[in-house]
Amino acid sequence: MLNTVALVLLFPLIGTIINGLIGKNLRKETVGCIACGAIGLSFLVSIVVFFGLLRFPPDARLFEKTLFSWIESGSFKAAFALQVDPLSSLMILIVTGVGFLIHIYSIGYMHNDKGYHRYFCYMNLFTFSMLLLVLSNNFLLMFIGWEAVGLCSYLLIGFWFEKKSASNAAKKAFVVNRVGDFGFALGIMLIFLTFHTIDFTEVFSSVSNEGFYAGSFTITLITLLLFMGATGKSAQIPLYTWLPDAMEGPTPVSALIHAATMVTAGVYMIARCNVLYVLSPFTMTVVASIGAATALFAATIGLVQNDIKRVLAYSTISQLGYMFLACGVGAFTAGIFHLMTHAFFKALLFLGSGSVIHALSGEQDMRKMGGLRHQIPITYKTFLIGTVAIAGIPPFAGFFSKDEILLESLTRGNFIYWSIASLAALFTAFYMFRLLFMTFHGKSRVDHHAAEHLHESPKNMTLPLTILAGLSFVGGFLGIPGASAINNFLAPVFSSHIHTEMSGIHTGSQHGEGHPYLMMVISTAIAIAGISLAYQMYIKKPDLPKRLSERFHIFYKLLLNKYYIDEIYDVLFVNTTKKGSVLLWKYIDAGMIDGSVNGIARLVGWFSNVFRLLQTGYVRNYAFYIVVGCIFIIVLTILGK
């Protein structure tokens, strides 16, 4: 059954080719069936592969399939080969499962779009790229998937390229990710120079065989360069600014990018390279610190945003910070567990926001919503489940995964990490229920034109919402403390690394038996506090937010304008680069290069004008030249004698 893993990649690729080449000539129903069918078949094969892997004992759950020899140049060899283990099998289930639901939702959401076939072509290609990334058995093939995901995100974010804001957002995402990818590429090169291979299994086994010690400079440099790529792809400080602008794409694209695919790539990569990361205490501290800082930083911005999709975008950045915090303290399983539950409830929330936008004829400003729970009841109920899940209320999925990260950040990390993560959890519960109350509760602020067309979304949009709501409820039971199925399943991937004490961060579990249950109570209390505060401000006293914003005007403006980070980046990097480019254009390109070429051309032209005088076309002139030439030859002959 594991030999069928190549089909997981093949089906989305076939869908991409068909819709890309002839989709324009097909009916929309056919285009949608091809795209959804491709991902659906890929999901079915992923299930087969998953259960095929379960047939083996835990320590034998590693399968590699080489499709063909790809590159052989001297000592450098790279095969086009796939790797199936607990981590990759879980990831392909998430990518294809959630991706399949998003594809079905897209049939209804994008039905009237003139670029329908192009949209599904890009969506299939995006899914193929992410599957290639997580199934690769070597760093170079992973890098191909990594770059392909970035390319597809550019195409999908800028799908409505007629809008200047959309095309700008696409370019921003592409350029910002190139910064991180530069470091990622350097890290892969250094891996080959160090280990003389880029195969995952060979690299990770060489770590122990070649005697690398904890804190090795080479390992630290490799892991920092790889993490540089992760900060770009997974939108962490300082390369997070592209993700909020990515909301310019269609809402299902936001769900695909921010839930199951692109933004999880960095977390997956660090988890995959856990053997390298545990050998670098410094890098682990950097990863945990960046993750914690990002979780809190993005959460504070989300407190005051008014665009429904931008609130979810900053929520995504914050939740990714939790995943990196978990990986940074050595709790890789907790990070992947939260990646899975986040895929469920964040896809649900984005698709739910799309249903709201669909009902309101494109409106995204929450200040122009309110009282929608009666008009779109299915959207409201499913959105409520997603909101409760991300807030961390038991027994929903987000409660178990976030609670585990809070516990691990304290027991494996330190009190500072726990405090930051807890404060971010408080803010998360607040801004998510702020979103819920402003959108679905209170008095209606809907424009009367939009109110006339208010309606619930069609079944092909509400069915994925219902399924994701169910997953957001039951998904957390895979990680119940003391009986965690996901911990047991992923143990072979994360237990093979070298255990080492790391400057306050420990790879071994340190918490006692009672700690998980105490943390459950504390994290639940934090979530309830955030919900209660949102309820008081937006239901009981709806005028209070305005009074607070006026009273703390400076701080409110700072958060509303996202700490002016985009403006600072414009001054420090964007405008500086533009000015440098203009100088290079004027003085190097136009001045030196064009000047030298044009100078040579002018010199040739001058000589041509001079020698042109010899070609007059008059016989008398040619006769005169002949006479002069003869005299010249005679003189030379006489002088020579």
Image (cartoon, rainbow, N blue to C red):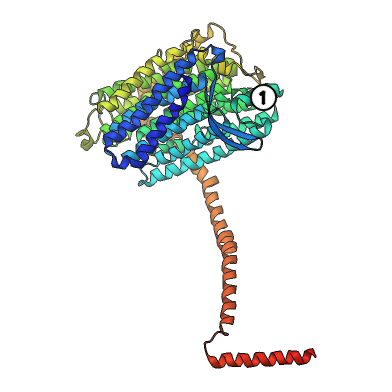
Towards the viewer: 374 or 207: 207
In-front residue for pair 568/208:
208
The furthest residue to the top: 513
Is 50 placed above or below 111 here?
above
Residue 216 place in picture, x, y as percent:
70, 27
Viewer can see residue 542: no
Tell me how many marks there are: 1
* Image spot of residue 589 (x, y percent): 56, 59
Left or right of residue 41: residue 624:
right
Query: Regarding mark 1 in the picture, which secondary structure is present there?
Result: helix
Q: Nearer the viewer, residue 180 or 578?
A: 180
Query: Residue 388: in sight, yes or no?
Result: yes
- Look at the image and tell me in which quarter the C terminus lies: bottom right
Q: In the current view of this chain or complex, which residue is farthest to the left? A: 452
10 Å crowding of disc 1: few (<14), some (14-19), many (20+) = some
**Residue visible at 20% across and 34% down in the picture:** 453
Residue pictured at 65% horizontal, 25% vertical: 280
Residue that mark 1 sits on: 206
Which of 364/147 is in front? 147
Query: Residue 544: image x %, image y %?
Result: 35, 27
The outermost residue toward the right is 641
Say left or right for 90 vs 353: right
Which residue is depicted at the point 33% across and 32% down? 34
Q: Amino acid at mark 1?
A: Ser
Residue 557 percent coordinates (x, y): 43, 37
Residue 5, relative to residue 366: is it above or below? above
